[in-house]
Image (tube, rainbow, N blue to C red):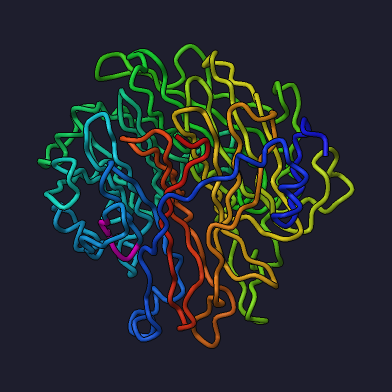
Amino acid sequence: MNPKSNILIGQPLVSVLCLLSSVAATAQTIVHSFDGDSGPSLAQCQAAPSNCGRQPEMNVAANGKQVVQSTWQNVRVYDYGGTLLQSTPLADFIRKASLDPMPPKSTKGPFEPHVVFDEFISRWVITSTCHSDCLMVSASADPLGAWGGVYLSCQQGGPCLDQDPGMKLGYDKNGVYVCSGHLGDDNAGTVRGASYDCFALPQDEVKAIAQGTAPAHINRAHNMPLDVVPTIDHNPRKAAGAPAFFMNKSCDHNAKPNACQQSIDFPFEWIVNTFTWDGSAGRYNSGGAQQSVKTDIGSKGNKWLYNTPCCGPTNSIPQAGSDTVTLRASGSHRVMNVMQFGSHLYGVLGSGPCTSSSCGAQGRDTNNVMIYVELDCSKPTACAVSQTAKISGAGFNPEFGTVGVDAQGNVGIVAVSSTVSTYLGLLSWARRKTDPPNVFAGPKTIIAGTEPHTCMPNQTVMQIGSTVGIPTALDPLDGTNLWTTQQWSNNASPCVFNTRIVEYQIGGK
């Protein structure tokens, strides 16, 4: 295999490591790996059918000694060895922050939580869909202590967002950034009639939320693209005037309303927006406009095609141990998270395979794929692709990929996968900063599933993953370590989901 190729054709682990001998040493080292939240049981599902067979919607962050995992079910605090220190039902957690956990048009309670630890203010931040979009902040670096919260979108005249907002969360040295869905608004880069509102909050005003004080400056932007993701930038030397970035993929604006999820051979582009601070206020896309960035290296043309995740009308993948129950993969059509390192942005997109005669340089596949991108935004108004790769193979179906970048610029990707011969488990890929461009080593099995994931007798498709996004967190005390969480299948009991929390290294110490 040509090490300069920007297409990685996946094979079983031994074959990949032989083919990529020049980057074989890139495989990650697992530092910690332990079980996170699980449930609900069949009896709980029968008592509350709206929660039956739901995906866990897991997110995780770390502060140097504690790990917080959020799911739709619980907010859980662990030490680094995996000992559970506290578990609080998400609804109770929201009530303790003086907010109402119940969305007005839903009976299933709060959902799609997202958690980060903001090392610049030593505070935890959690968002969730609740009465309106909830924003909760810890009063200290200890997640076991007090929390406060506000309905962010309701501030300064609103409107309040409460219709499945799918909230996204990011931060940098200068601020915290929240984006959530706004039905009826429009952005030319994505489908009609559904877009996002984004909020840029000064760091000091975020800290005050813990005491129930609403931010005086929310810097709201309407008509942002659907599924836009704020970046996480750990740079402690970031200039006050350096922009924060927001990224996602484009979709067919003139097609059916669900075209962002369901398309055939669509030549998507990367969409980039910015926010630049000026004191406590600032401006979106200062000095330019929303960018549509072509996907080939140098961004002179488009290389990749987006396709509806495989397979069939349920967009679901097979799993070992069950001929009738499949796992729904369609939620992985979004960019799960975006990391910034220096002036570069890093993301990975899930897609169905291209199977037609129009695949071109992308090539044909039989299973789902991931498209990796590194954007050079050293000129913030003119980002361009500096590296990109397709991750695919006949032996795996990569779903819900989350990208991490350590303090040395090494890149890791963790995703879940199942096939007709494998249960739902965790796979990883990696490349060191010094490796040949556009190539990843992997997949490496982090943990293999042991049982099929099933539920009620008449339920033939199981939801998996987290459609709100899955972050990978850089450890604030050790820049060589990255934390993430995913779902896996390790319980023969019907309806029970399992999650795994993983800390890994790429380049070593």
Q: Is residue 326 left or right of residue 64?
A: right
Nearest to the observer: residue 71 or residue 468: 71
Q: Is residue 392 above or below residue 509?
A: below
Does residue 75 belong to the magenta stretch? yes
- Look at the image and give the residue range highlighted in magenta: 72-78
Does residue 492 belong to the magenta stretch? no
The quadrant of the picture occupied by the N terminus is top right
Nearest to the observer: residue 31 or residue 214: 31
Residue at point 29% right, 45% down? Answer: 160
Residue at point 48% right, 54% down? Answer: 467
Q: Is residue 362 left or right of residue 91?
A: right
Q: Is residue 51 left or right of residue 319?
A: left
The quadrant of the picture occupied by the C terminus is top left
- Measured as percent of width and height from the top left, residue 339 is found at 47, 34
Q: Given the current orientation, which residue lies at the most extreme right position? A: 357
- Measured as percent of width and height from the top left, residue 35 is found at 39, 64
Residue at point 32% right, 59% down? Answer: 82
Confirm whether residue 253 shows in the render. Answer: no
Residue at point 40% right, 15% down? Answer: 242
